[in-house]
Image: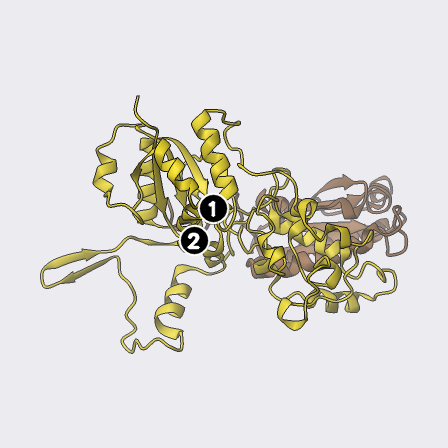
Chain colours: A brown, B yellow
Amino acid sequence: MEGFEPKIVAFCCKWCSYAAADLAGTSRLKIKPNFVVIRTMCSSRVDPEFILQAFLNGADGVLVAGCHPGDCHYVNGNYKTLRRVMLLKKVLEQLGIDPRRLRLEWIAASESRKFVVTIRKFVDELKQLGPLRLEAGDDNGSNG
Amino acid sequence: MGKPKFAFYWCASCGGCEETVLDLNEKILEVVDKVDIVFWPVALDFKRKDIEVMKEGEIDVAFINGAIRTSEQEEMAKLLREKAKLVVAFGACAQLGGIPGLANFWVRSDIFDRIYKKVPTVANPEGVVPQQVVEMDGYKLTLPEFYDTVKTLDQTIPVDYYLPGCPPPPDLIMNAIETILKGELPEKGTVLAPDKALCDTCPRNETKPEKLSIKDIKRPHEVIIDPEKCFLAQGIICLGPVTRSGCGERCINANMPCRGCMGPTSEVRDQGAKAVSFIASILGVEDEEKLSEEEVQKLIDKIVDPAGTFYRFSLPASLLRRRRK
């Protein structure tokens, strides 16, 4: 996939992963520019609908990032996130979308390097997978 | 002024929506008293040409059931839209795609292959599949096009109101007809049913524990279901939390969990995604801090066919609409 630059939507929780992304910036770490961050209060605020909507709106990959298990600011939100992402991956696979396009990572506020590496690895993987090309209303059919 | 003119039509559906009109029982006589039924192919001998000669807006209400999967259904939906002042999407298939919408997990070629060649009871050694045009003895025979993708009615024509359910319950139908006859119609696009989740009216709501936790997923045929207790508390997937009420809890009263035919409430865009969300949040919640990722995966894997379960009635109406190639 020559010249293809994947687009990533990264849902980051305010308390850990967003802080890590912020720290990566203030520490002037070099990071691939293929992502946009959407900050949520908790990774468990990320409704599966948001993820599907992100894919429909042109994302080639979606990253959901939260605090490490046991470290959730809201005690146990991220455990729900883990199960939602796992279940949604199965649904995505059945709908013909490679589940690797949805990635879950635990990134603590201090782990700016992990954020950088996560994005880099995700970009590389999405380059292998190629563009997703889902458009709203595209039904792959011959109707109308 | 004569009586209001009603039309009924049947697209990709099982026929249950036609029967449910008869479930109005003696009330159907009141309806027939107040309206003229000008088109109802399943019951009355009016033809397409009878509709074609009508003026625009001459029909007051067209109730269309079924999803749209062939060119003929699309044409008829468009014709009725042109002639009717109001179009009501009648039933789960017209509103959401319904059971025929599950075909969106495949494409036409897979479906034809399966139905006409691979089903064990089919003998078709020459591999004949339906063609749109066939020439035979100098005659040209045609069939409507069978589309790759099943669509909802409102993805085909503008729809004014929706009557949900598989099939819509008689009290909601009667209510809708009375509302229309009185001219007290709500805002266009309204689903003519209550807007609360089924759990709210479920007779088993009392037995729902304060904190729901599913330790293990059970399928209805694997267990003897307690006829009093909340299905989710028994580990059986029930779509009550993400499904609109108003169905009369017919499945629940028959000791079967909700499968979601009434569609989501107006707050929810994608019923299946919401189902993913709520099932995942109560699955193994009791021991969530102790479970390893492998153990969680095992629990999740006990949900057989999650997409088919969560989008059973709503795949064409969902955000993704179909399986992508």
Q: Who is closer to the viewer here, B281 or A66? A: B281
Q: Who is closer to the viewer here, B173 or B320? A: B173
Q: Who is closer to the viewer here, B226 or B104? A: B226
Viewer can see residue A98? no
Q: Residue at the location (68% across, 59% down)?
A: A87
Inspect the image, locate mark 2, and give the three-letter code of the amino acid beneath it.
Answer: Gly
User: Which dot marks residue B16?
Assistant: 2
Q: Position of residue A19 (x, y in %)?
A: 85, 43
Q: Which residue is at the far front? A: B26
Where is residue B60, by image quadrant?
top left
On whether disc 1 and disc 2 are found on a single subunit, the reply is yes
Q: Please report contact status of discs 1 and 2: CB closer than 8 Å, yes or no.
A: yes
Q: Is residue A124 above or below residue B221?
A: above
Q: Which residue in the structure is indicated by mark 1?
A: B91
Where is residue B246, by image quadrant?
top right
Inspect the image, locate mark 1, and give the three-letter code of the amino acid beneath it.
Answer: Gly
Q: Viewer-nearest of labels 1 and 2?
A: 2
Q: Secondary structure at mark 2?
A: helix
The answer to which of marks 1 and 2 sits earlier in the sequence is 2
Viewer can see residue A46? yes
Q: Chain of mark 2?
A: B
